[in-house]
Image (spheres, rainbow, N blue to C red):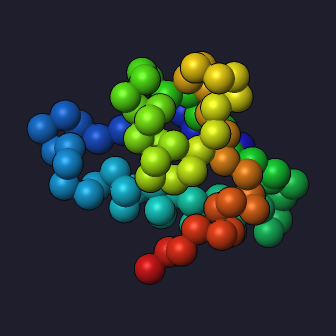
Amino acid sequence: MYIGMFGVHTPLRKMGIGVLMMRDLLKRVLIIAENAGVRLLMLDAVNEEAAIYYERKFDFQRVVEGGLQMFLTLGTIMDLNFP
């Protein structure tokens, strides 16, 4: 699966909204994966700062070292601890 545009309006950042949105998205990916052949989730980080955020918060991996295209395997999503 590929995530298109995904983000939080600048004045609303640092309030936990992005984490809540991503957790909801990842839960939905798991539901979809039960019915489709989903193996991983991909996104293109808008910049290096966003890439580091996705790495640290959600364990996304870079397709190419230093690149902004990133992925998260279904197994990693299942291992994340959702409240």
Which quadrant, please, contains the C terminus? bottom left
In the picture as drawn, the residue positioned furthest to the front comes out as 65
Task: Look at 44% across and 35% down and name the residue there.
Answer: 52
Is residue 63 something one can see in this rendering? yes
Please determine whether, in this image, residue 51 is positioned above or below residue 73: above
Q: How many marks?
A: 0
Please determine whether, in this image, residue 74 is positioned above or below residue 7: below
Task: Look at 50% across and 74% down and name the residue there.
Answer: 82
In the picture as drawn, the residue positioned furthest to the left comes out as 11
Residue 34 lies, in percent from the top left, at: 79, 69
Residue toward you, 70 or 37: 70
Residue toward you, 49 or 15: 49
Residue 28 lies, in percent from the top left, at: 60, 63
Q: Is residue 13 left or right of residue 70?
A: left
Please determine whether, in this image, residue 78 is positioned above or below residue 66: below
Task: Look at 19% across and 34% down and name the residue there.
Answer: 10
Which quadrant, please, contains the N terminus? top right
Q: Is residue 59 left or right of residue 10?
A: right
Task: Look at 75% across and 62% down and name the residue there.
Answer: 75
Q: Is residue 35 left or right of residue 29?
A: right
Is residue 2 something one can see in this rendering? no
Residue 71 lies, in percent from the top left, at: 67, 40
Q: Quadrant of residue 11?
A: top left
Q: Is residue 16 left or right of residue 44?
A: left
In the picture as drawn, the residue positioned furthest to the bottom comes out as 83
Residue toward you, 63 or 9: 63
